[in-house]
Image (cartoon, grey):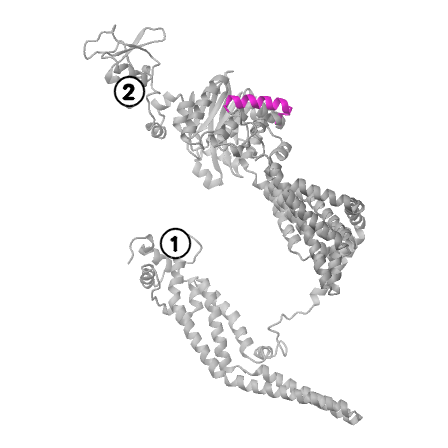
């Protein structure tokens, strides 16, 4: 599995002075979160979290406040020490790194963007972006050169000599993003980067981030409390509740096959048009029983990866059923009006 | 009555009052049903007074009416058995004694043939007799007011009882609401409360009554104990003299002497290092020709704080120069400069430490309070014992008084650095040192600058006190003016200190504002 850049195995975080005893008790007796709080007055931050992220993937972690998602992401660069478990980033066992190696990892390999920007108010935008390089001991000329490039990437040229307080929230967060990119890290950790912004700016930044991420091919762990955002951005989504991961899957899997009622509640409000694809609603061509005579040759054809939105467009321009083709161009399935409407309604025929 | 709130859940009130539930339910409903005042009479509270409060756990009620009833009882006691003219009568007797003495002296003098002397004594005796008559009159007048005082006392007591009866249910309802919301409030009657109330009343009332109603309370108390504990029992003064104080003061002396003898080298080292800083500053300020110092100061004010401060600086220095106070002023500035410099050098690192370690700060906090609130004279004494007199001990006294602000405000600034900003810096691989110099100190700087400013001003306020232990300068000038009541000298010296302080403060603040204002 050399393709996995980040791997977490059974990571636990328990807050409180009695954490180790509480951990042992959980292992032996399987105490619940409430029991741990009552017996050890310890709070379970994250519980038994395991997942892996592939190179170049955007892995979204979605959960409500208090679900442990921000705590979890801080384990990846060890801003928080886990109580138990294994964390591996880029082939390094994070828990066995020396202080120096850990600092090197943070300065060179892992960039982070924070919900509240956390820029340094006494430094210009340029020096804020160059900060990770300064920590690494790079000379000023190099720092300025790199920060110039990064600011270009996030469309902030012309603001280099301003102070953060002179910038709007959206701009500040772009500075935060540029700062995270400055050290050219392999891994980006984004802790609710767009949550504090208003919806319009948020959408802009999401688009900008997706363009950047496609260009730079960074492995990203993206924390959000907004399922829409997670679905827009993520290649895969993990849903957290009470410190546990309830479900991991592609946006389509999450929407079409929610693991439990909790996830289903979230998914209910989500528009499925762009998440459900022809192959998951079509009737295989052999099983299709037409209600009226159909001329397959006149029917429009669509790739099996076409989403419902496009299928509706096609359906409105023809009286015929839609034939779904496979990757090799062969006809593999049929979508007729009834199937399409069912699909829009429930996501699944 | 009102049925729109949870406060009227029946079991609520019943569970709270425990007995007499029906009565309190009606009364509470009455109170809650009206916005203004409503008549709600509690006979039990009126009769038992503070004891009712004690039993019900209404301690505010208990203490308030304990004191009020006591006041009324004292009036009644004075009216009933108080010897109202007692003070005046005692004075009358003393005067009579005095008169007898003078007359005796006069008789002696006459016998010795000193007629003039005898006449003088008799004159005094006559004057005293007039005073004695007045005292007697006053005593009789006081005695005749007894009935009025008694009546006042009784009326007062009745009024207090009335207030108790009317107020009790209001107080108790408020307590009920506290109890409901889970705050600490007693429910129901409690025997322990009654006992405590009784003990409280017994401890307070009898002695106080005796003190204010009986003419000779000390003898009266002694007679109550049957004379077992002596003729007189002191009840207004604690029956201890200076015996313990002397023992501990002597121990303190010995301790200081021991320290001075055994750690002389340490103290000498401290003195030497302070003198080193002081000498440097004095060379800079006093030995440098005055035109140079003035020119540099004005230019500095102009560059750092702008033309207005520069003009003010020039005017202040002209005042110092023309009043012939230039050298004294420079000595003073060197003194506080050395003090402030050392404060900053020592205080900022300490402040950083206290800002980072909560435990260290918890230990330091009382020490800092002590340094700021302890009167300067108290630590001047050991300073003289350890360091002698002169300028370095003066600087040291300044240090003790002026260092807390810079420590406190540095610590405050350090703790005010947002966690999220620190976290971000760590996430980018900052070491502890990088974090301190690149993030924490710059963000804490405004607070630290305020601290330095405060420290400078407090150092200035110490110059007069420092002059008490031999530090020269403007402070000594004022001290001298104080000793000879030289009003003009004092005023001019005071103005000189004021101008020094304002110039330093304005330049420092202007410099800071320019720094923090640049780029914004």
- Please tell me which residue is depicted at 54% across the width and 73% down the height of the picture: B208
> A204 and B353: which one is in front?
A204
Tell me if residue A141 is in the magenta stretch: yes
**Residue nearest the viewer, comparing A79 with B312:** B312
Where residue B396 appears, x then y in whole percent? 73, 51
User: Closest to the observer: A195 or B363?
Assistant: A195
Secondary structure mostly seen in the magenta stretch: helix
Instruction: Tell whether position B443 is magenta.
Output: no
Residue B248 position by quadrant: bottom right
List x then y, in percent, for residue A328. Answer: 36, 6
What is the chain identity of the residue bearing mark 1? B
Q: Please, which chain is the residue tagged with disc 2 on?
A: A
Please give the label number shown on residue B180: 1
Residue sitting nearer the eye, B448 or A193: B448
Q: Read off the magenta span.
A: A135-155
- Indicate the position of residue B509 as horizontal and vertical percent values: 63, 44
**Image x and y of residue A103, in percent:** 60, 27
Res. B388 in view = yes
Q: How many marks?
A: 2
Instruction: Determine the residue located farthest toward the left in the rendered image.
Output: A292
What kind of element bears circle 1?
Answer: helix
Alpha carbon distance from label 2 to label 1? 55 Å
Side of B176 relative to B497 (left or right): left
């Amino acid at each position: 599995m050399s393709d996995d850049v980040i791997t977490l195995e059974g990571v636990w975080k328990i807050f409180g002075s009695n954490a180790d005893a509480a951990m042992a008790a959980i292992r032996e007796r399987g105490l619940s979160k409430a029991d741990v709080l009552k017996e050890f007055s310890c709070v379970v931050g994250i519980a038994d979290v395991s997942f892996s992220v592939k190179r170049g993937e955007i892995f979204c972690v979605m959960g409500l406040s208090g679900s442990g998602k921000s705590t979890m992401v801080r384990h990846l660069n060890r801003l928080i020490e886990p109580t138990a478990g294994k964390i591996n980033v880029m082939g390094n066992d994070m828990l066995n790194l020396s202080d120096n190696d850990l600092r090197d990892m943070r300065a060179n390999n892992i960039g982070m963007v924070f919900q509240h920007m956390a820029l340094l108010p006494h430094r210009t935008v340029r020096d804020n972006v160059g900060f990770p390089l300064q920590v690494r001991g790079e000379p000023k000329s190099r720092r300025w050169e790199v920060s110039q490039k990064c600011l270009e990437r996030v469309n902030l040229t012309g603001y280099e000599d301003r102070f953060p307080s002179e910038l709007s929230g959206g701009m500040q967060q772009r500075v935060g993003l540029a700062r995270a990119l400055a050290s050219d890290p392999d891994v980006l950790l984004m802790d609710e980067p767009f949550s504090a912004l208003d919806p319009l700016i948020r959408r802009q930044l999401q688009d900008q981030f997706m363009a950047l991420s496609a260009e730079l091919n960074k492995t990203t762990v993206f924390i959000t409390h907004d399922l829409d955002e997670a679905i827009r951005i993520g290649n895969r989504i993990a849903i957290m509740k009470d410190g546990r991961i309830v479900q991991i899957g592609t946006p389509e899997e999450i929407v079409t096959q929610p693991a439990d009622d909790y996830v289903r509640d979230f998914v209910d409000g989500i528009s499925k048009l762009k998440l459900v694809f022809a192959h998951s609603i079509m009737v295989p061509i052999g099983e299709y029983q037409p209600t009226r005579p159909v001329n397959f040759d006149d029917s429009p054809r669509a790739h099996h990866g076409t989403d419902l939105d496009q299928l509706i467009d096609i359906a409105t321009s023809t009286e015929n059923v839609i034939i779904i083709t496979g990757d090799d161009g062969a006809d593999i399935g049929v979508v007729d009006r009834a199937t399409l409407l069912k699909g829009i309604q429930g996501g699944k025929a | 009555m009102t049925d729109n709130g949870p406060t009227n859940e029946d079991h609520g009130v019943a569970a709270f009052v425990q007995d007499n539930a029906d009565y309190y339910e009606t009364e509470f409903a009455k109170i809650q049903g009206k916005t203004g005042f409503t008549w709600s009479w509690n006979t039990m509270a009126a009769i038992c007074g503070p004891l009712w409060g004690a039993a019900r756990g209404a301690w505010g009620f208990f203490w308030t009416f304990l004191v009020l009833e006591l006041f009324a009882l004292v009036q009644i006691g004075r009216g009933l058995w108080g010897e109202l003219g007692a003070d005046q009568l005692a004075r009358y007797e003393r005067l009579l004694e005095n008169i007898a003495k003078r007359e005796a002296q006069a008789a002696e003098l006459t016998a010795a043939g000193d007629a003039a002397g005898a006449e003088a004594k008799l004159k005094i005796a006559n004057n005293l007799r007039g005073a004695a008559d007045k005292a007697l009159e006053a005593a009789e007048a006081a005695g005749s007011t007894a009935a009025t005082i008694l009546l006042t006392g009784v009326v007062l007591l009745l009024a207090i009882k009335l207030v108790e009866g009317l107020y009790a249910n209001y107080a108790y309802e408020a307590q009920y609401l506290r109890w409901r919301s889970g705050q600490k409030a007693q429910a129901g009657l409690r025997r322990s409360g009654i006992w405590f109330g009784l003990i409280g009343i017994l401890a307070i009332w009898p002695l106080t009554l005796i003190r204010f109603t009986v003419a000779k309370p000390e003898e009266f108390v002694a007679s109550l104990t049957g004379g077992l504990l002596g003729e007189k029992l002191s009840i207004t003064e604690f029956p201890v003299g200076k015996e313990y104080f002397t023992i501990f003061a002597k121990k303190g002396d010995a301790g200081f002497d021991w320290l001075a003898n055994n750690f002389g080298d340490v103290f000498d080292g401290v003195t030497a290092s302070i003198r080193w800083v002081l000498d440097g500053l004095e060379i800079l300020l006093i030995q440098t020709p005055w035109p140079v110092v003035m020119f540099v100061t004005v230019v500095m004010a102009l560059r750092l704080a702008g033309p207005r401060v520069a003009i003010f600086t020039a005017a202040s220095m002209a005042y110092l120069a023309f009043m012939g106070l230039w050298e004294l002023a420079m000595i003073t500035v060197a003194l506080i400069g050395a003090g402030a410099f050392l404060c900053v050098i020592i205080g900022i690192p300490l402040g950083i430490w206290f800002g980072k370690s909560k435990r260290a700060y918890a230990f330091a906090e009382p020490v800092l309070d002590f340094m700021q609130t302890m009167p300067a004279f108290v630590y001047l004494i050991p300073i003289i014992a350890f360091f002698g007199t002169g300028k370095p001990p003066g600087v040291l006294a300044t240090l003790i008084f002026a260092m807390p602000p810079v420590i406190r405000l540095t610590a405050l600034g350090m703790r005010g650095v947002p966690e999220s900003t620190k976290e971000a810096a760590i996430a980018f691989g900052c070491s502890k040192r990088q974090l301190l110099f690149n993030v924490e100190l710059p963000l804490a700087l405004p607070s630290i600058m305020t601290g330095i400013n405060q420290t400078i001003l407090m150092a200035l306020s110490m110059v007069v006190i420092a002059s008490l232990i031999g530090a020269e300068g403007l402070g000594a000038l004022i001290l001298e003016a104080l000793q000879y009541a030289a009003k003009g000298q004092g005023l001019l010296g005071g103005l000189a200190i004021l101008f020094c302080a304002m110039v330093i403060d304005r330049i420092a603040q202007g410099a800071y504002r320019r720094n923090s204002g640049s780029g914004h």
